[in-house]
Amino acid sequence: MSTEFASASLTAGQLNAIVKKLGGHDMALRFLRDELSVSELVRSWREEDGVIYFSVTSDGTTGEDWIKRLEGNGFRVGDYAKQALRSPDFKPTKGLTTEVAVLKGMLFEDQNRITKKIRAEADKRKLSKPNAELACLIREKFTDKEIEVMGLWHIVAMHEPINDSGGDPSLLCVDLGDSGCWLRAYGGKPRERWGCEGGFAFAVS
């Protein structure tokens, strides 16, 4: 029978980090006494070959009510996002479950990471434009930390663009920038260029 400690391959720093994760010295002792349990984190998404998959279900929330609902839960809604949500082109559904595929920006070369070519890649993969409400459902479903774990800084819902008050097309986007927790709207023009840290959400046909 081996007498080697199970922790033999761990550094002092790693052991210290484990104790911190458990909540400190007293909590670590509680864990050893079986007074505290640790459960495996179950993710509500999965990743395969640079594509993140999950599902959401709509509940008929209108654009105006999304503004109230998100802000009431501590999220921030940008001015252009509010314009999109209040547009007659924002048409909510109810009880529609959408299987979502998010193409990570890393899948595209810098010169190809533009809206037109991202949509072309989605077409090749038989993905389709989602309803604009998808951005709201994603914003509510995932914390900024979960999106960061995905390796993303923002997720753009690649719906049919909605014109803002100036007549420019925009896409609703979940954004971690400026202290996070944002729902914003960005340019939806075909040649709009995006950063590699973004994700582009489509519906699985």
Image: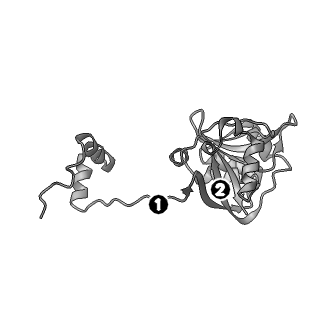
Q: Is residue 143 left or right of residue 8?
A: right
The answer to which of 109 and 40 lies nearer the viewer is: 109
Within 10 angstroms of label 1, few (less than 14), some, or many (20 or more) residues? few
**Residue 76 numbered tag:** none
Find disc 2 in the rendering and name its residue: 101
Helix, strand or loop for disc 2: strand
Helix, strand or loop for disc 1: loop
Q: Is residue 166 left or right of residue 41?
A: right
Image point (88%, 37%), residue name: 167
Find disc 1 in the rendering and name its residue: 42
Image quadrant for the N terminus? bottom left
The answer to which of 146 and 5 lies nearer the viewer is: 5
**Is any part of residue 63 visible from this angle?**
yes
Image point (65%, 56%), residue name: 101
Within 10 angstroms of label 2, few (less than 14), some, or many (20 or more) residues? many
Q: Residue furthest bottom?
A: 95
Which picture quadrant has residue 156?
top right
Q: Vertical placement of 123 versus 193: above or below?
A: below
Count the marks: 2
